[in-house]
Amino acid sequence: MSDKASSPGGTDDARPVVGTRIGELRVSVDRKRLVAYAAAGGDRNRIHWDEAYAIDAGLPGVIAHGMWTMGAAVELVSQWVGDPCAVIDYRTKFSAPVVVPAREAVEVCTEGHISRVDVAANGELRVVVDLTVTCAGHKVLTRAQAVVSWKEPVGA
């Protein structure tokens, strides 16, 4: 992982501001990590570790788990806000697989920008973060968006 996410809102004491870049995060994945993820998550589908099987299934090679890819991407938001439990909604569309070669790692790169700040009925801010998620220069997730419950009440 690299590039620590900037502080919320871009400064240490500011509320989130639409358009603010929250940072960038790069997460490496190799076949060893895929096997460990499969063991932890119970998804032992052969497309995540068997090259010939993945190609026979019509894929370009072994691919990372979709849930692993989503988790790697939302980690940027968790680091930025400082509390993974503050992420109250997260959604995306899978647009391309993360292809993981046999003898090297690839990086999943995530950048985030604040696209909206709303006020909830309880006075908390809801911060919407749009994510751009790529691997080897190709978008692997589209319409990736996380919503953060900002605990500072409006007017504080």
Image: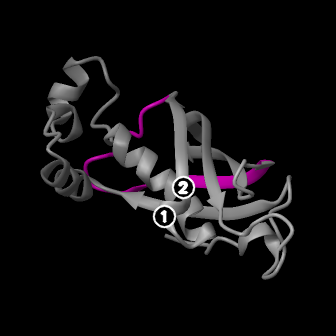
Q: Is residue 135 visible?
A: no
User: Picture coordinates of residue 30 (x, y %)?
Assistant: 30, 55
- Number of marks in the rendered image: 2
Residue plotted at (78% across, 60% down): 21
- Which residue does the numbered mark 1 point to in the structure image? 84
Amino acid found under the numbered disc labelled 2: Val
**82 or 69, which lies in front?**
82
The stretch in magenta equals: 96-116
Left-right relation of 144 to 152: left
Report if the CB atoms under discs 1 and 2 are less than 8 Å apart: yes
User: Picture coordinates of residue 140 (x, y %)?
Assistant: 52, 36
Query: Is residue 111 inside the magenta stretch?
Result: yes
Mark 1, residues whose alpha carbon is within 10 Å: few (<14), some, or many (≥20)?
Answer: some
Amino acid found under the numbered disc labelled 1: Pro
- Which residue does the numbered mark 2 point to in the structure image? 87
Left-right relation of 133 to 1: right
Q: Where 108 sits versus 81, above or below?
A: above
Left-right relation of 113 to 32: right
**102 or 131, which lies in front?**
131
